[in-house]
Image: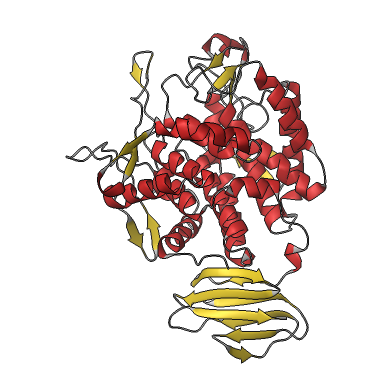
Amino acid sequence: MTALLDEAQLGHLKHWDDLSRRLPHDWSLMQGKGAGEDDFGSYRFQLAYMVYGLALTHRHRLPAAPGLFRPTIQRLIEKLLMPDVWLYWRDVSRGGMVMNAHLSDGYHEEWDPVVRDNIMYSAYVQSCALLHDHLFADDRYAQPGALTFEHWSFFWGGEPKRFAYDRDSLNDHIYWQMVENGYLGVACEPNCVFQICNQPAIIGFRLHDAITGGDRADEVVAGYEKAWADFGRLDDTGHYNQMVLEDSKVVRPNALQAPWVDAWCGALMNTWNRDFVREHYPRQVADFLEHGPAGTIAVRSTPAMEVMGQTVVNDTCDLGWVAAWASEMGDRATLDGILAHADRFMAPTWNGGALYYPRNDTKNDADGNRTEIEPMTGNVLLGYARLNVPDGLHELYQRPWGPEHHAQPALTEVGRDVEVSRAEVVDGVLHARLRRTGDDAAVVVGRVPDGARLRIDGQEVPTTAGDVRLDVPAGPAHDVELVP
């Protein structure tokens, strides 16, 4: 039996669902310190890692509840395609930052957000769409134009901009960018190939292979390993190298020993490079942790960079990324300490059953305890870490679901006001625990075989083969069983 979801885990799922239902262009609670949507706390990362967190929860904790996750993931992907999320690329594509300013005469303003570079966006669209279609045995994002980027303004920009892709054409496009760059990876900002940002693309290749029967992920990993062997995956201090500059082939180390570099890279790379990641994790993470009162653990952040006489303002998301990394590593002591710190010092907030940690730009309280938290951590990463399981991404990558999973009985539709703390098939029996929280409390049990018996709290209710609709009764949580 999989453990029941606890109150905090259910609260994070509710918060993600609530955010997915915001009206278009309403980014309430999601705005971070950075301007222009080009930093690490931007909307694209929050949306993508909500999708990743939902995928991990479905895969490992509630595998028989596709109806709970599918609509939320679809709404988040819809938001991921909105111009609010990707218009930053029109400006970033022109270059001018310190690592590509000398090349910027050769760049131009690019409206298509996935056609060149920008793997820090394109790989998340690719992998999120493929997660959906893999987890739900669906071809929703394989349809022509299913992943289309559109923008038009009455006031500026000229003719309408429309760039149509789908999961297969986008996957192919990113793959060929990898090949053309010798498998080193695709750039984020022009000229900057980050280790971190190419990991989601590899995850996407693996999911595409699982759907289509290809083997691109293995090919790309082999080429990627060979390409990076020239630079070394780790810097001289044992932390992950941050990036390689395309023009000079100079590797940029994690010179400031920023926690987010190691944590983000390690959490994702565990998918295909588990032994390496785990070998270096204990020593790496120890450099970042600050032990506080009553078993709490905070994460130190490096001072803001000074560049061209300016202080860089952005969200590092250090604490959140180390929590996510610890969850993937199965480091329960570190994860519990970080969550305890967040619960004590970072104002956990409940709103109609939804749990999040609101943005706070104040670095520390009067006693020196870290209080600074950004929306990426407070909305997404702490929930992601709570809901993930040890090797969660690794298992999703290495052991994708086969067609037999999608033939099993499941909760194929779940009303908004139904709390699902258990949904799994054990020895052919569907087990679910459901609690009604409002009026929208209908559930559909799908794929019901002939002769199956449905029980609610041990009492049998009539069924027919196919789909069975039931309204979850009021009161405490109810146990539902479908026995073949």
Give the residue displayed 55% in from the left and 33% down from the top: 279
Q: Is residue 382 left or right of residue 467?
A: left
- Residue 175 visible: yes
Say which quadrant the C terminus sits in.
bottom right
Numbered circles on residues, count? 0
Q: Which of 129 and 62 is in front in this view?
A: 62
Give the residue displayed 58% in from the left and 80% down from the top: 480
- Residue 36 visible: no
Q: Which residue lies furthest to the left in this view?
A: 366
Q: Can you give x and y, in whole percent of width and height, for residue 48 in the image? A: 55, 45
Q: Can you give x and y, in whole percent of width and height, for residue 353 in the image? A: 39, 65
Say which quadrant the N terminus sits in.
bottom right
Is 107 situated above or below 415?
above
Please tell me in which quadrant of the rendered image residue 354 appears: bottom left
Q: In this view, does 470 lie to the left or right of 325?
A: right
Q: Can you give x and y, in whole percent of width and height, for residue 287 in the image? A: 39, 30
Is 301 situated above or below 330?
above
Q: Which of 21 and 68 is in front in this view?
A: 68
Q: Can you give x and y, in whole percent of width and height, for residue 409 in the image? A: 70, 72
Q: In this view, does 349 lie to the left or right of 89?
A: left
Q: Residue furthest right?
A: 213
Q: Nearer the viewer, residue 88 or 275?
A: 275
Give the residue displayed 32% in from the left and 57% down from the top: 349
Q: Which colour scheme is used?
A: secondary structure
Give the residue displayed 72% in from the left and 42% down from the top: 206
Is 1 situated above or below 119?
below
